Image (cartoon, rainbow, N blue to C red):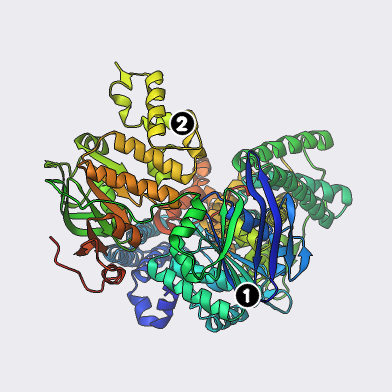
Amino acid sequence: MAAPVLELHGITKRFPGVLANDDVSFDLRPGEVHALLGENGAGKSTLMNILYGLYRPDAGEIRLRGAPIELGSTRAAIEHGIGMVHQHFMLIPVMTVAENVVLASEPRQAGVFLDYDAAVRRVRELSERYGLLVDPTALVRNISVGQQQRVEIVKALYRGADVLILDEPTAVLTPQEARELFEVVRSLKSRGTSIVFISHKLNEVLEVADRITVLRRGRVVGTIPAAGATEEGLARLMVGRDVLLRVDKLPARPQAPLLRVEGLRVEDDRGLEAVRGVSFEVRAGEIVAIAGVDANGQSELVEAIAGLRTPTAGRVEIDGVDTTRDSPRRKLDAGLGHIPEDRHLRGLVLPFSLAENLSLQEYRHRPVSRFGFLSLRRIAARAERLLREFDVRGGGADTPAGALSGGNQQKVVIAREVDARPKVLVAAQPTRGLDVGAIEFVHRRLVEQRDAGRAVLLVSLELEEVRSLADRILVIYEGRIAGEFGPDATETELGLAMTGGTSGAEAA
Amino acid sequence: MTEWAQRLENPLSARLRDPATSGYAGIVLGVLAAFLGIPPVQARSVTWQVVVGVVAVVFGIWTVTRGRRRLGYGAAAAGLLGIGLGILATRSSVDNLNSVFNAALIAQTFAFATPLVFGAIAGIFSERSGVVNIGLEGMMLMGAFWGVYGADKGGNWSVGILVGAAVGGVMALVYAYFAIHLRSDQIVGGTAVNFLALGVTGYFFFQLYHGNYVPNGVSTIPNVRIPGVADSHFLGPAIGNLNLMIWAGFVAVVATWFLLFKTPIGLRIRACGEHPRAADTVGINVYAVRYGCVVLSGVLAAIGGVYLSDGFGGGTFTDNMTEGRGFIALAAMIFGNWRPAGAFGAALLFGFSSAVALRLQVYSPSASTLFNVLPYVLTLIAVAGVIGRTVAPAADGKPYRKQ
């Protein structure tokens, strides 16, 4: 076994009130993909920010090829050959790919001028050598997210990185782009680059990693070879208990339709038609999923159903009542529950307390308010009941919503929407950015709602989620329903329809 | 593919079919219609003005029907305005026209534009690095006073420029500390700079010059007489004898463009203004870049001020001498979309309308105040009608906090 290229020994990092890393040790061998697995808040990003010189550890030692090094700044990390691809890309949209890549270590002409042609050449060279297809002269804002990520990788390689940190690299990618990324990772590995792959997704860690280190609450709970590891085993290490990865549910017993959408047409913010004549219905007691690649009209469809966007044509009926042009409040009164795709923008008022957030719908009904006055006592009591019921951790009724982790924030949104006892529950990407434990919780709740006789419309970009939860799957492509599938459809079938290949069985 | 690549692939024919082309052609024709009435063409019948103006309007309407509505309406308006101004010119006496529109108007345009050129360039440096500099006005005013003081006490105009620039730089350094380190609100901070400058210059003007006048004979920034050109019939009064700082302003525009868009330093400056965290993660010291740019901004604005008092003003100073020129410079910068060439063009437009406004007094001295709003009316028309939305650097005005 080759000597490790990079070792972290006993790294400890404290933030006010939190022990983010507690005596963490980690090593990376040359040409290895070492996954760092853990839930949100387990300390993965903190550890990598220490490695990239953004934070200083309170204790511990970093060794590069056996020699201890001091990483006081990102510049030092870059000089030691450590490159990082951040989860939120560090790219400048109005500049070209080449400009982004060479920033701060520019090729020069006559010592003073930026040699842009040389920059373009270098980027082209690197992109060909590693199979990272990017156009050096394109503006970053005009290229896809997958391409932007490749630019980030080229950027690290340009700086001579032989240790590459990928921070949640697939979080923003479509399944196809993720597959391409794995190819790139393998090609980098075969050329001797060592890679730290940070993720909370079990399947991709198993697919791409050689070894896996699991972090839980800032501590290493184990480092195991990927060969022979199972998703169940990893999930147990990550969460500290057994996790139900496959959703346990009985066959659906659908009743009368509660949500009916007919010939719906919706325009997006730019005035372009995003939803082009969509029709479907969701019956009581079933989960219907809308699957598709991001930005194929899902957001506009959900907003039209929720009353946040007025459709240009078509009908939306809730339990037989035409609500096409109703305001969001009238939709709520008609029996709609909405878990919005962006919980920060639409789901919660972050500076408000949990009690206030939980009362955003009920505030005008008894017993929360009477004769136009809020009863703070009843609001608090109700909030405490819901927080208990929905197992919200990290704060009480008085805690501002912004202080909670993503998973717990989502629990608050779900608690509010479910407690209003809607007939139709629309859940738009309800598990985005959540970790395994929280995902399990959300899934269980959605199935519960189905079994309680509600019509559940799930909009998701995650194929696995769609397949495990839905009773029927509708694939949306460029604003049209490209096909309807049963829950047993394969990923290939769905993937094909999602990219406009062939349609599946005839729509019902 | 990018928009540019597409344009390059099918060059001329596509360029001609592009609605933008007909729109810009309409605007040019509208300007031409107005131009026909004044010297040197000076058509005395209205025919040509109307014909050209109508063509401009047609181009404008055509552009509107092909989707570029804002540009099309702008062209149509330019056409109508051109007809109006062209007709107006034919109603005026030839004497008056000749005294307003002559070669010296060009020189005067440059003279009025130069403080704005320096101010706009100053603003570009600061804002491209991510710091809004509404304190340009104050920095310019400080340059105006301390420049003339330096020239007076140092006995030479070059001392004046050095002293003015240094004071502007120090002023900017103070502002930079508040804006960058203390992360205070940049609009409030900049406004404070303006009031501070007004107070400081007013106080010292009173203390040092008893608040009324700077003695005669202060060494002023010289004009540059170009041999050969200076005696020419048209070019002589236009550019043969311009002030040194006017030429320096031209150089500053070109140098700024080079620095910002052709050198690594420029790339880093722009990176700090667009996405400071991205700049930070590749090892750029965002704070250092911003400090440097804000101080440079103060120096440049102050040099514009020195020109105002010791060049344009001929070695004088008056209370609040800049009279809002710092703000106009800021408008020129925005108008020019944070680019040196664009800002230069905008500054020339403002300078031109100021110069014309001054000369229009031959028609009606009592209405001269009214003529002075011309630059601002032009700004409104141009910004609303033609330019549309300009895009500021993404992180402009947002203090950066290291992780």
In the image, A137 versus B66, the foreground residue is A137
- Are the residues tagged 2 and 1 within 8 Å (C-beta)? no
Kindly identify the residue that appears in the image at 53 percent across and 44 percent down: B368
Mark number displayed over residue A158:
1
Task: Give the image location of residue A432, x and y in percent.
Answer: 41, 53
Mark number displayed over residue A13:
none
Please state which amino acid type lies under the numbered disc 2: Ser
- Neighbours of disc 2 within 10 Å: few (<14), some (14-19), many (20+): many
Kindly identify the residue that appears in the image at 36 percent across and 60 percent down: A462
Task: Give the image location of residue A324, x and y in percent.
Answer: 18, 45
Q: Is residue A313 left or right of residue A8?
A: left
Q: Where B196 sits versus B288, above or below? A: above
Task: Give the image location of residue A489, x and y in percent.
Answer: 25, 66
- Outermost top residue: A371
Q: Where A179 sits versus A118, above or below? A: above
In the image, B64 versus B267, the foreground residue is B267
Secondary structure category for the residue under label 1: helix
Mark number displayed over residue A353:
2
Q: Quadrant of the N terminus of chain A?
A: bottom right
Q: Is residue A212 visible?
A: yes
- Tell me which chain the residue with mark 2 is part of: A
